[in-house]
């Protein structure tokens, strides 16, 4: 059987890391696409030359021609611009919306059967626009953010409790912005919910609140440190987790930006929710019941996403 084909649209910091991870995990052959002359070819060759030492079997190709992504099984989209210190993700909307249009058309014409994972920010609005521009089925287009935000939450919690990150589970839902919703009630250490751990004296409510806020600010914390761009190792690892679940039909239950129509009280928006990812793409959205307070936070986050979607419609008539 031929190896799966993984197309990475955008060969910048995340794109290059994705290519390296996909090759090392032997998820398939990799095509790195970018408009920056020489960058995708250079990164593909560099990573391919790590193959003999690492011992992986994967072909890598760099290109600026959409024809080379033909027949891709998975497309992961990072094309666009990252933010700099002082900017919000939302400041990227105008410039990255134009990029989504070009990418959507490229995918529609060359890889219409692919499972598409969007990473470009502002994530929830960009994945919505990418689905519209590509015309692919909504269950085959999703966005990566919740896995990353939850991983950050899990990491901070593991430090607080001094336990393995493997035993910490967490769910961060809502839009990938300042209004994201880390759900403490559904986050655990080996199945023990965080509110119970507070009662048991493992931590205090004040410390937990500070960790929730650090999670919300997790992207900005890295941008402030790097100064020239945003996080890329953890974002790439998170998207690979989603791609692997699709390619291997693992049916992982992961928080992803999925098209919600008739779930979570939504009517046609992308926002972070618990999803099952398998060979059918986003196979199920787990419509969990939120408490009044959680619902208020979720509604606030959805309102922010809706505002960005309206801004997209204002910029590009074809989306209205
Ligand atoms: N969803 C998330 O959780 C998350 C996490 C981290 C970063 N991001 C976002 O991901 C995006 C990429 O981040 P990065 O660090 O890889 O940025 P980067 O600048 O390193 O790479 C982006 C690449 O996109 C390319 N590009 C620009 N326009 C293009 C087009 N029309 N077609 C193809 N390629 C094009 C650029 O040449 C560049 O190589 C940013 O928007 C960033 O904000 C999202
Ligand atoms: O914060 C950013 O701009 C990048 C990304 O959304 C992140 O959360 O790391």
Image (cartoon, rainbow, N blue to C red):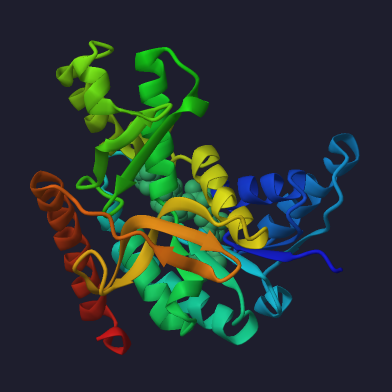
Is 15 on the left-hand or right-hand side of 295?
right
Can the viewer see residue 121 in this picture? no
Q: How many marks?
A: 0
* Residue 138 pos. (x, y %): 43, 77
The residue lying at 83 percent from left, 58 percent from top is 59
Image quadrant of ligand 2 equals: top left
**Which quadrant would residue 307 be assigned to in this image?**
bottom left
Q: Quadrant of the N terminus?
A: bottom right
The residue lying at 51 percent from left, 73 percent from top is 140
Residue 117, placed above or below residue 131 = above
* Residue 272 pos. (x, y %): 33, 56
**Which quadrant would residue 316 be assigned to in this image?**
bottom left
Is 146 on the left-hand or right-hand side of 205?
right
Front-most of residues 102 and 307:
307
* Residue 3 pos. (x, y %): 81, 64
**Which quadrant would residue 270 be assigned to in this image?**
bottom left
Can the viewer see residue 304 in this picture? yes
* Residue 163 pos. (x, y %): 45, 16
The residue lying at 84 percent from left, 36 percent from top is 54
């Amino acid at each position: 059987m031929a190896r799966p084909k993984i197309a990475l649209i955008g060969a910048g910091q995340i794109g290059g890391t994705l290519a390296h991870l996909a090759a090392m995990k032997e998820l398939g052959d990799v095509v790195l696409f970018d408009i920056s002359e020489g960058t995708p070819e250079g990164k593909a060759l560099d990573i391919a030359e790590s193959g003999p030492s690492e011992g992986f079997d994967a072909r890598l190709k760099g290109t600026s021609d959409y024809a080379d992504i033909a027949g891709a099984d998975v497309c992961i989209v990072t094309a666009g611009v990252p933010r700099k210190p002082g900017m919000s993700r939302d400041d990227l909307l105008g410039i990255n919306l134009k990029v989504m249009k070009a990418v959507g058309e490229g995918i529609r014409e060359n890889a219409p059967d692919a499972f598409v994972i969007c990473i470009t920010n502002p994530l929830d609005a960009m994945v919505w626009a990418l689905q519209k521009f590509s015309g692919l089925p909504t269950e085959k287009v999703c966005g990566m953010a919740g896995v990353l935000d939850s991983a950050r939450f899990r990491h901070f919690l593991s430090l607080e409790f001094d336990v393995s990150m493997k035993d910490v589970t967490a769910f961060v839902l809502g839009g990938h912005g300042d209004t994201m919703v880390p759900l403490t009630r559904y986050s655990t250490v080996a199945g023990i919910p965080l509110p119970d751990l507070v009662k048991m004296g493992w931590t205090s409510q004040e410390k937990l609140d500070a960790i929730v806020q650090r999670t919300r600010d997790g992207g900005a914390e890295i941008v402030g440190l790097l100064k020239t761009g945003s996080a890329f190792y953890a974002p790439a690892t998170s998207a690979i987790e989603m791609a692997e679940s699709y390619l291997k039909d693992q049916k992982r239950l992961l928080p992803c930006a999925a098209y919600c129509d008739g779930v979570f009280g939504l009517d046609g928006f992308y926002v972070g929710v618990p999803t099952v990812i398998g060979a059918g793409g986003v196979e199920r959205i787990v419509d969990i019941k939120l408490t009044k307070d959680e619902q208020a936070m979720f509604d606030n986050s959805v309102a922010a996403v809706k505002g960005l979607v309206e801004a997209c419609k204002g910029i590009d008539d074809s989306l209205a």
